[in-house]
Image (cartoon, rainbow, N blue to C red):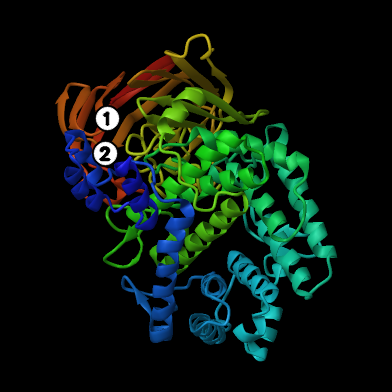
């Protein structure tokens, strides 16, 4: 009993100082060798601290560091070599405002600390009011101004002249055309941004309620139109791009309604439950988030926290699901501080250490990315606190709970019509594979994060803004006229075997009666070849088989398959490659003539959102005809 009370004391008073506990155990006569593992937690160990403790003890300190740095260095501020106010970041005024405003609101009212933050806020508002501020930046600014108004601090945070300038600048009409209310060259999730800005302007007394009501209805109608009966939003106007945003968007809508004091309709809660079901499948103790689509990095993880936190607050989850969703959120928060933060630069790092992200989130936005992620953690932590989870000790058996409660296989249909779009989730050996079957559409169709591949962190990864030069794990066909074709856009007849009856061997197949001719921003249909693709999932192995067909003899200049992998120390034997180090143990192809392997040597073309790949296997077949059926396949073995 003495040991139990000692452990509890140190757990809650000094956040589990494990080394001290370890030193005390011999004094109590307990020298179990198995306890040695507690000296330093492995990265896969779930968070011991609650999400609230992690945010309070880490995030506000980081924001304070940036506030002091901006206060001291002003317009000349550099972070990891980037001049943050000279970097063409179109959201920076709003992100600076919301981060400094959160510090103001977190400080004790009337304290010297709060007065310091109010002074910095006021000076930086004067400085940044002349900068460009677009869409999300406008929303962030409006959100914090409304919070400051409710706290009775807005007059202390802004000089009158700056306040008047902001009232004019912070307007949704800068990216929504009137009278059509069409978004100006933006994806559909920006309807939520426009509604939020308009609603907050109404709450600030800057406009009447009519525009926000219209934008809300347009947002809901648009969501219904392009999510249809399945409840997941197409990121385009019907092209079929579904990604993490498609699963997240309903949660963002619910968050904005709650933020601005509006009720969340029951039909939205029903759709939110569908997104929550997907998010629950992703629960793990390693800190992994979504593995497919654009703009991943830490946003792949915060998206899951957003879905699960608002689902819990709105009682869309059961009490047991809430418990483990909170533990997962705490684990992801811990992962953010331990993995994504670079202690040398005192900053988020999505661009170094072999990591690569979209140009949209380029390093020129380093300050804004620190601030927007900080805001997401503060916002979702507040949601969890309102749901009753403040400082609750997270459950420590995440993986066991997932194994007991979540299915090994799950099929999520996104759309069915002229073309089919879906996501198949498969769990095996502690990994979750996400087979994405969509069309990346304009600007993304040839980028590997949207290929129909079974993504899983450190096993199968796309490369942001990759293009088709190295078409990760897809048969890439060059015809005799130099046309380059990929099977990426025109999927029909997605069929999944009965995995309830036979969960040990699961097949997913789909057909494309035309391929995507690469070279333009949007897909171009080329009907000279068609293909039927079949994935077979067994324990420790995934096989992809493509059977290409042509109604007339078609000359092929080359057919190639490349696999960029995190595995190392390869040995080749004909068309098979084995690896001694890494999660992938082997990769083999059939139907091709030759394979070679080489190290990536830090080539940016083989950098994933979370780190550099180590090896590349490249297989080819040159100068042949496809007449009738031609099969080609690859098999990936993993541990």
Using the image, tell me which numbered label, if any, was put on residue 584: 1
Q: Is residue 579 left or right of residue 480?
A: left
User: Quadrant location of residue 75?
Assistant: bottom left
The one of 402 and 131 positioned closer to us in this rendering:
402
The residue drawn where x is 53% and y is 85% is 115
Residue 383 image position (x, y, % from top left): 60, 54
- Could you tell me which quadrant the C terminus lies in? top left
Q: Is residue 265 left or right of residue 78?
A: right
The residue drawn where x is 56% and y is 74% is 101
- Could you tell me which quadrant the N terminus lies in? top left
State how many labels appear. 2
The one of 340 and 469 positioned closer to us in this rendering:
340
Label 2 environment density (alpha carbons within 10 Å; few <14, some 14–19, many ≥20): many
Using the image, tell me which numbered label, if any, was put on residue 566: 2
Task: First in sequence, mark 2 or 1: give its number.
Answer: 2
Depicted 150 relative to depicted 29: above or below: below
Residue 8 image position (x, y, % from top left): 37, 47
The one of 384 and 98 positioned closer to us in this rendering:
384
Label 2 close to label 1 by CB (< 8 Å) = yes
Q: Is residue 65 left or right of residue 28?
A: right
Q: Does the image show residue 84?
A: no
């Amino acid at each position: 009993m003495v040991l139990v009370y000692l452990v509890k004391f140190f757990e809650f008073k000094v956040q589990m100082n494990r080394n001290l506990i370890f030193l005390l155990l011999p004094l109590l006569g307990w020298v179990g060798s198995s306890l040695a593992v507690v000296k330093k937690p492995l990265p896969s160990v779930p968070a011991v601290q609650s999400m609230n403790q992690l945010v309070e003890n880490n995030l506000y300190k980081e924001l304070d560091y940036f506030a002091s740095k901006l206060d001291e260095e002003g317009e000349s501020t550099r972070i990891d070599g980037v001049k943050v106010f000279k970097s063409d970041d179109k959201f920076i005024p709003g992100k600076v405002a919301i981060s400094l405003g959160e510090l103001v609101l977190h400080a004790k009212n009337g304290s010297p600390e709060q007065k310091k933050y109010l002074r910095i806020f006021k000076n930086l508002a004067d400085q940044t009011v002349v900068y460009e501020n677009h869409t999300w930046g406008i929303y962030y600014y409006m959100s914090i101004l409304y919070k400051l108004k409710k706290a009775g601090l807005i007059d202390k945070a802004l000089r009158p002249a700056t306040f008047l300038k902001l009232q004019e600048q912070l307007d949704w009409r800068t990216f929504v055309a009137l009278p059509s209310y069409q978004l100006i060259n933006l994806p559909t999730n920006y309807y939520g941004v426009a509604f939020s800005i308009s609603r907050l302007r109404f709450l600030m007394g800057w406009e009447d309620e009519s525009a926000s009501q219209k934008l809300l209805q347009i947002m809901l109608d648009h969501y219904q139109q392009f999510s249809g009966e399945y409840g997941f939003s197409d990121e385009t106007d019907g092209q079929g791009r579904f990604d993490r945003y498609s699963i997240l968007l309903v949660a963002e809508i619910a968050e904005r309604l709650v933020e601005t004091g509006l009720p969340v309709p029951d039909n939205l809660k029903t759709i939110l439950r569908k997104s929550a079901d997907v998010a629950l499948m992703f629960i793990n103790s390693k800190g992994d988030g979504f593995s497919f689509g654009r703009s991943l990095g830490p946003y792949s993880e915060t998206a899951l926290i957003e879905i699960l936190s608002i689902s819990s607050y709105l009682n869309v989850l059961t009490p047991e699901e809430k418990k483990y969703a909170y533990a997962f959120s705490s684990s992801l928060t811990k992962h953010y501080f331990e993995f994504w933060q670079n202690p040398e630069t005192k900053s988020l790092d999505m661009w170094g250490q072999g990591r690569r992200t979209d140009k949209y989130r380029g390093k020129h936005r380093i300050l804004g990315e620190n601030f927007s992620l900080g805001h997401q953690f503060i916002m979702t932590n507040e949601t969890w606190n309102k749901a009753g989870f403040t400082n609750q000790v997270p459950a420590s058996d995440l993986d066991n709970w997932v194994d007991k409660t979540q299915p090994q296989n799950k099929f999520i249909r996104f759309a069915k019509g002229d073309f089919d779009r879906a996501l198949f989730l498969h769990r095996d050996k502690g990994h979750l594979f996400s087979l994405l079957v969509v069309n990346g559409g304009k600007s993304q169709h040839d980028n590997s994060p949207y290929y129909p591949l079974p993504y899983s962190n450190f096993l199968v990864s796309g490369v942001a803004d990759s293009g088709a030069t190295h078409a990760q794990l897809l048969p890439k066909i060059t015809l005799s006229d130099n046309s380059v074709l990929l099977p990426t856009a025109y999927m029909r007849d997605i069929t999944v075997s009965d995995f309830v009856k036979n969960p040990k061997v699961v097949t997913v197949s789909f057909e494309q009666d035309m391929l995507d001719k690469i070279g333009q921003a949007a897909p171009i249909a080329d009907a000279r070849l068609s293909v039927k693709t079949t994935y077979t999932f067994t324990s420790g192995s995934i096989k992809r088989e493509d059977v290409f067909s042509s109604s007339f003899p078609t000359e092929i200049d080359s057919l190639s398959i490349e696999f960029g992998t995190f595995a190392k120390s390869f040995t080749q034997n004909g068309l098979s490659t084995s690896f001694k180090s890494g999660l992938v143990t082997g990769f083999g192809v059939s139907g091709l003539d030759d394979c070679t392997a080489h190290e990536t040597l830090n080539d940016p073309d083989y950098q994933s959102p979370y780190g550099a790949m180590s090896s590349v296997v490249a297989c080819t077949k040159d100068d042949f005809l496809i007449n009738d059926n031609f099969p080609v396949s690859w098999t990936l073995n993993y541990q």
